[in-house]
Image (cartoon, rainbow, N blue to C red):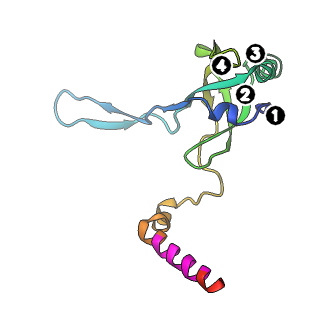
Amino acid sequence: MNDYPLEQKTVQLSAYSRQQKAQFSTVETRSGKLYFKRIAQEQPILRNISFVLLDYEAQIFLHWFNNVLKKGFLPFDIKLATEWDTSQTLNCRFLPDSLLNTTRNNHLQWSYSAKILINNYGPPDYIPLDIIDYQNYYSNKARSQLDQIININLKNIG
């Protein structure tokens, strides 16, 4: 597809944030209790993103943006850090309201910022659906037991 042409570090070194609207709203009544109403199954996930690039990377980036993505119109795949993985491939689109604001940080770096729409945000296939059941593996007690087992076995090896 239209993969991001540069290394992930050009995005990971810069700042980004994610916004997601609620899938419900509150309904105010004239009297009585406030109640909640579902408004959608899925709400779009938007992310502010910036790219910190050296001169030659900026040239590659602009060529990709202008020619491959048709000035940002086409969707693209990019690797970003998420709650589930440090390098998850996401399918995205640039949004027109903040498209590639440019600043020059110093004589070596260019910064481009934009807002993107993420089309496939969710856990990768290898994350168990019942992840809540796995929290015991991450508890302090479980980690200290594992440390003891490893230390005992390492002493036996040596």
Q: Which residue is label 3 attached to?
A: 71
* Labelled pair 1, 3 in contact (Cβ < 8 Å): no
Q: Label 3: few (<14), some or many (≥20) within 10 Å?
A: some
Label 4 element class: strand
Please identify the quadrant where the N terminus is shown.
Answer: top right
- What amino acid is labelled 2 in the image? Pro
Q: How many marks?
A: 4
Q: Could you tell me residue 21's position as x and y percent?
A: 46, 31
Are there few (<14), some (14-19), or many (20+) residues within 10 Å of tag 2?
A: some
Q: Earlier in the sequence, mark 1 or mark 3?
A: 1
Q: Earlier in the sequence, mark 4 or mark 2?
A: 2
* Mark 1 or 4, closer to the camera: 4
Q: Which residue is mark 1?
A: 1
Task: Identify the residue at horizontal 66%, vertical 25% (top origin).
Answer: 51
- At which x and y percent is residue 76? 74, 30
Query: Does residue 7 belong to the magenta stretch?
Result: no
x and y percentages locating residue 132 in the rendered image: 47, 61
**Which residue lies at the image location 83% right of the left edge and 18% below the top edge?**
67
- Label 1 vs 4, first from the N-terminus: 1
Res. 75 mark = 2
Q: Is residue 44 above or below residue 70?
A: below
Give the SS element for disc 1.
loop
Q: Which residue is mark 4?
A: 112
Does the magenta stretch mainly form a helix, a strand or a loop?
helix
Work out whether 32 lies above or below 59: below
Q: CA distance from mark 1 to mark 3?
A: 16 Å
Q: Magenta residues?
A: 144-154
**Amino acid type for the residue under numbered disc 1:** Met
